[in-house]
Amino acid sequence: MTLEDALSRPTIPVTDAGLLFFGLARNAAYEAAKRGDIETIRIGGRIVVPVAPLAAKLGLKAKFGGAA
């Protein structure tokens, strides 16, 4: 997934968010999410990252809906 792809989606997997936005490997991304450093949403057994708030915190603009 590219940064462009991520910014065009409402949510992305924790691993993709960690890698694309922070350069984190899989385990480090999940640890950051567990600490609350990466905002997440739990849907059933799945954990995803909402792109718009993350992009806004980093000064980027999400391209999905009316976000950021």
Image (spheres, rainbow, N blue to C red):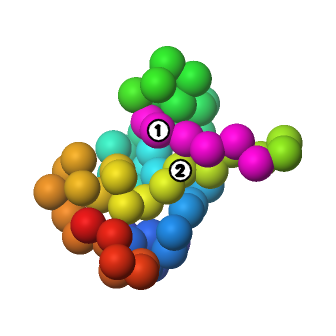
Residue 54 percent across, percent down from the top left? 35, 51
Residue that extends furthest to the top in the rendered view of this protein: 35
Q: Nearer the viewer, residue 13 or 57?
A: 57
Amino acid carrying label 2: it is Val
| Above-or-below relation of 10 to 34 | below
Q: Image quadrant of residue 47?
A: top right
Name the side, left or right, on which 14 lies relative to 66: right
| Numbered badge on residue 50 | none
Residue 51 percent across, percent down from the top left? 43, 60
Name the side, left or right, on which 24 lies relative to 45: left
Span of residues in magenta: 38-43
Residue 52 percent across, percent down from the top left? 37, 61
Identity of the residue drawn at 26% across and 67% down: 68
Q: Residues within 10 Å of mark 1 (few under 14, many from 20)?
A: some
Identity of the residue drawn at 15% across and 57% down: 59
Mark 2 residue element: strand
Identity of the residue drawn at 59% across and 32% down: 30
Using the rendered image of the protein, determine whether residue 66 is visible from the camera's viewpoint.
yes
**Is label 2 in contact with label 1 (beta carbons under 8 Å)?**
yes
| Above-or-below relation of 6 to 57 | below
Residue that extends furthest to the front in the rendered view of this protein: 66
Of labels 2 and 1, earlier in sequence is 1
Q: Image quadrant of residue 27?
A: top right
Amino acid carrying label 1: it is Glu
Name the side, left or right, on which 67 lies relative to 14: left
| Numbered badge on residue 49 | 2
